[in-house]
Image: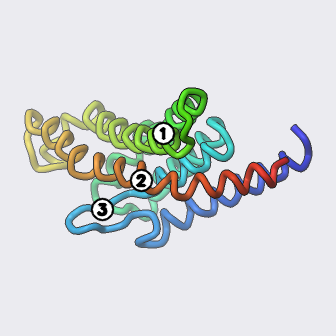
Amino acid sequence: MPVKKNTLRLNMLAMFIAIILLQTSIPLIGYIPIGPLEITIIPMTVVVATVLLGTVDGAIIGGVWGLTTFVRAFVWPTSPLAAIVFVNPIISVIPRIMIGVVAGMTYTYLKKHLKSQAASISVSAVLGSLTNTVLVLGLIYLFYKAKAPQLYQINIKELLPYLLGVVGTNGVPEAIFSGIVTPLIAVPVKKIFDRTSR
């Protein structure tokens, strides 16, 4: 890799890591309250990084978010539930890494088959966002279903419908929001990035 391109890549990685740290630390820039919902927009940052830098770097940025979630679960949990479930790195880290992997593989495939770059990015953003939601909630069910009465004040039989409800009320709106907004950011930034990296 040419020195100029590698330097730009490292600078972009550092910038995205800084953005992730800000989004996880400052209210309203990583999580946007919309009525009764709280839309997580951090997956959008991971997808933009993936589109610009590739699948591996997208997975790294996702991993940084995951590690931040993991550390915060010990020192500054966002909720009582976070202090219980996100201390498990399989739940806090792996789904975040997989955002970059799924979005990157999707984008790589679609940009060869779709004329619209915006559409390729949009689908990648939707799938990346849903990957995070489904994996986090699925792994919570897998690891903590026996503790459902303590964690959610519901019995084990009601846990799966409850988690599916969370997918519908939070996960789907987040994915739609990500699918709409991510291309608006990524397309113009990618044009600049591609020109600069030549």
Question: Residue at position x 8%, y 40% from top?
Answer: 155
Residue count near mark 3 (Cα–Cα under 10 Å), binned few <14, some 14–19, many ≥20: some
Which residue does the numbered mark 2 point to in the structure image? 180
User: Seen from this angle, which residue lies furthest front?
Assistant: 115
Residue 158: x and y in percent read: 9, 38
Along the polypeptide, which appears first: circle 1 or circle 2?
A: 1
Find out whether the residues at labels 1 and 2 contact each other: C-beta distance under 8 Å: no
Figure quadrant of residue 15? bottom right
Q: Using the image as rendered, state which of residue 152 and residue 40 is in the foreground.
A: 40
In the rendered view, does 75 fall on the left or right side of 193?
left
Residue 176: x and y in percent read: 34, 49
- Look at the image and tell me whether residue 93 can be seen: no
Question: Residue at position x 29%, y 52% from top?
Answer: 173
Q: Nearer the viewer, mark 3 or mark 2?
A: 2
Which quadrant is home to the N terminus?
Answer: top right
Judging from the image, what secondary structure is the residue with disc 3 in? Answer: strand
Q: CA distance from mark 3 to mark 1?
A: 21 Å
Figure quadrant of residue 51? top right
Position above or below: 156 against 6: above
Q: CA distance from mark 3 to mark 2?
A: 17 Å
Q: Using the image as rendered, state which of residue 167 and residue 81 is in the foreground.
A: 167
Amino acid tagged 2? Ile
Which residue does the numbered mark 3 point to in the structure image? 38
Residue 42: x and y in percent read: 47, 56
How many labels, in total? 3
Position above or below: 46 against 101: below
Judging from the image, what secondary structure is the residue with disc 1 in? Answer: helix
Along the polypeptide, which appears first: circle 3 or circle 1?
A: 3
